[in-house]
Image (cartoon, rainbow, N blue to C red):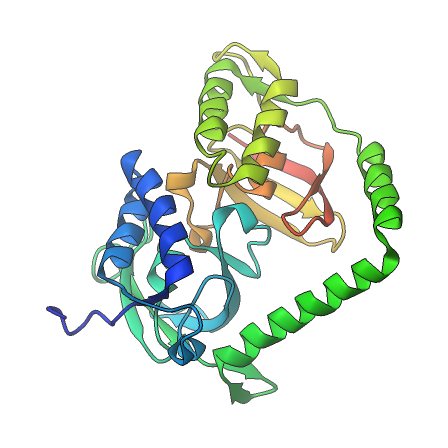
Amino acid sequence: MNNPSIPDVTLPASDHRRLERLAQAGADQGDVDARFLLSEINRAEIIPDGAARLDSIVTMGAWVTFWITWGFPRETRQLVYPEDYASERTQIPVTSPLGAALVGLKVGSEMPFFTAGRPTSSGSSASVEVKRMTLSGLCFAIRWSRAKSSLVTMIRDHQQLRKGEKVMSKINRKSKAEIVLPPITVMENEARRLNTLASSSAMLFPRVAHFLAQEMERASLVADDSDLRGVVRMGSQVRYCDDKTGEVRDVVLVYPHEADIALKRVSVLTPVGAALIGLSVGQAIEFQTPGHNKRSLTVLGVSN
């Protein structure tokens, strides 16, 4: 490599193909983070999916422990595609600055990256270092975490199969019937832009794009100069409660190219973001995560 301070990046062939399409689509729309991701993909070494070296590489779906040099504590999160991003506490979308910096790194590597809006001693740059996974103070490799994730998935799938397709079908139909969506209000210009976003993202992120398109279809549209105090718009600072856990979170709802998990800037092209748009203070909404689990949140406050 030309720059010794930049670590090597290694990707399995399957991740490389999907990430390249994802990054190129965002880069074509002028997304700075997508361009960073694309540059990482272009310099990556591509190896077969089953290569033993991948046991110590951050791949899509892997759980990784890391720390950021501007003072954040060590964290453990799962690296996911944007359409699978459902939890800001446990996941990192690969299209965020942090996600793009992590993908393909080897355990022990340190990677500099830029994140908008966070000043540091070197402008708005920082670096992330990949650590090993920890449990009760003992270190174990990323391989264990990835294997554990696969094992949990296998157990869950097996349990679902044992219930029988007919039972699951009835449960799914009942769940859909129980969901009552609250009325939402969206400005005409934002609705047009969000419809375009949903349409252009349908191939890459079909589930969340469909959800966002459905929300725009049922929304009540108002003029752009309407007084929407207390209504979640693009750019709104939102306080909401996870109705299952009771946890209260503060986020800013933004377009995908502005998303940054470290700054609590949540993309509207995520399940939570698509659920929030157009809601008013006091309203609750139930929606489905990429894992087909029901989730509910209530808006506690909005600042536009």
Q: Is residue 273 left or right of residue 65?
A: right
Query: Measured along the vertical axis of the image, is residue 180 above or below residue 222?
Result: below
Reply above or below: 188 against 172: above
> Residue 200 is drawn in which quadrant?
top left
Specify whether residue 288 is in view: yes
Q: Is residue 223 left or right of residue 53?
A: right
Total numbered badges shown on the rendered structure: 0
Which residue is depicted at the point 33% across and 61% down?
A: 101
Residue 226 in the image: above or below residue 212: above
Task: Say if 17 sits above or below 215 in the image.
Answer: below
Percent coordinates x, y for residue 3 in the rendering? 13, 69
Residue 102 % position (x, y): 37, 64
- Which of the image's four quarters has the N terminus? bottom left
User: Which residue does the image show at 55% across and 80% down from the upper left?
Assistant: 144
Residue 14, by quadrant, is: bottom left
108, 231: nearer the viewer? 108
Q: In percent of the image, x 27 and y 47: which residue is there? A: 35
Identify the residue shown where x is 31% and y is 76%.
109
Name the residue at the top extreme. Answer: 223
Q: Looking at this view, is 27 or 233 the one in front?
A: 27
Q: Position of residue 125 (x, y in %)?
A: 26, 59
Q: As drawn, is 266 to the left or to the right of 127?
A: right
Residue 95 appears in the figure? no
